[in-house]
Image (cartoon, rainbow, N blue to C red):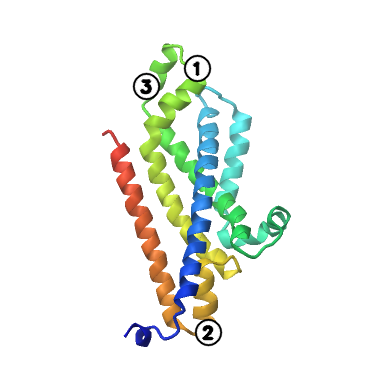
Amino acid sequence: MLEELLPNMDWEKMIEATKETLYMTSISVVATFFIGILLGLVLFLTAKGNMWENRVVNGIISALVNIFRSIPFIILIVLLIPFTKALVGSMIGVNAALPALIIGAAPFYARMVEIGLREIDKGVIEAAKSMGAKTSTIIWKVLLPESMPALVSGITVTSIALVGYTAMAGVIGAGGLGNLAYLEGYQRSQNDVTLVATIVILIIVFIIQIIGDVITSKLDKR
């Protein structure tokens, strides 16, 4: 019955493509999480009235974040081809997609981190300062714990965006479900392959959203 409904399906290829998509997504999510938090913290701390207030540093990082956040992902991949070749040695394959995925997503997440940090009650930060807490202590004991629900919610949204990015990267040879849907499905007019690849991507997105919602609800003390 299934073979009649999906006559062109090669399940081994589908499983391999799913593994590639999960690999690209998981590696880029982990890297984006740490880079985004670092950039978001610097943006927050160097802003006016905060502990590391520095207009120049804040302006430079803010400009870079805005630039890379604004470039359409498909164009970013093309712009990063020389960098990707120098770093990975190729512009084709799952590893070749990682630099563009991380550089495309980290600035997006950094802004979410900054917004999450801004929502922290300033009274909590001032109380920590008045007790003589160092900046490092305030970061680890106040800023990150207090903003954790927003950070998890933000990385959930970013992870879902990254799944979409991997599909776009697949179209130009990065592998994964996007590559399978385009080469095996669209170019060969095998609509069943495109349909199944799309369904698998949707399942991945739903799972990420559910996990993110559960963790956020457990961390949210309100």
Amino acid type shown at disc 2: Arg
Q: Is residue 5 above or below residue 142?
A: below
**Left or right of residue 174, residue 221 in this image:** left
In the picture, the disc for residue 113 is none
Dividing the picture into quarters, in which one does residue 84 lie? bottom right
Residue drawn 35% across the image and 85% down it: 5
Could you tell me which quadrant the N terminus lies in?
A: bottom left
| Closer to the eye: label 3 or 2 | 2
- The span from disc 2 to disc 1 (Cα, nearest Å) is 61 Å
Q: Position of residue 161 (x, y in %)?
A: 46, 56
Residue extending farthest to the left is: 222
Tag 3–tag 2 contact (CB < 8 Å): no
Amino acid type shown at disc 3: Val
Secondary structure of residue under mark 2 = loop
Residue drawn 37% across the image and 22% down it: 124
- Image label count: 3
Which residue matches tag 3? Answer: 124
Residue 188 visible (yes or no)? yes
Q: Is residue 76 above or below residue 53?
A: below
In the picture, the disc for residue 188 is 2
**Left or right of residue 100, residue 212 in this image:** left
Disc on the earlier residue, 3 or 1: 3
Q: Position of residue 148 (x, y in %)?
A: 39, 36
Most foreground residue, 82 or 50? 82
- The span from disc 3 to disc 2 (Cα, nearest Å) is 60 Å
Tag 3–tag 1 contact (CB < 8 Å): no
Residue drawn 38% across the image and 65% down it: 202
Which residue matches tag 1? Answer: 134
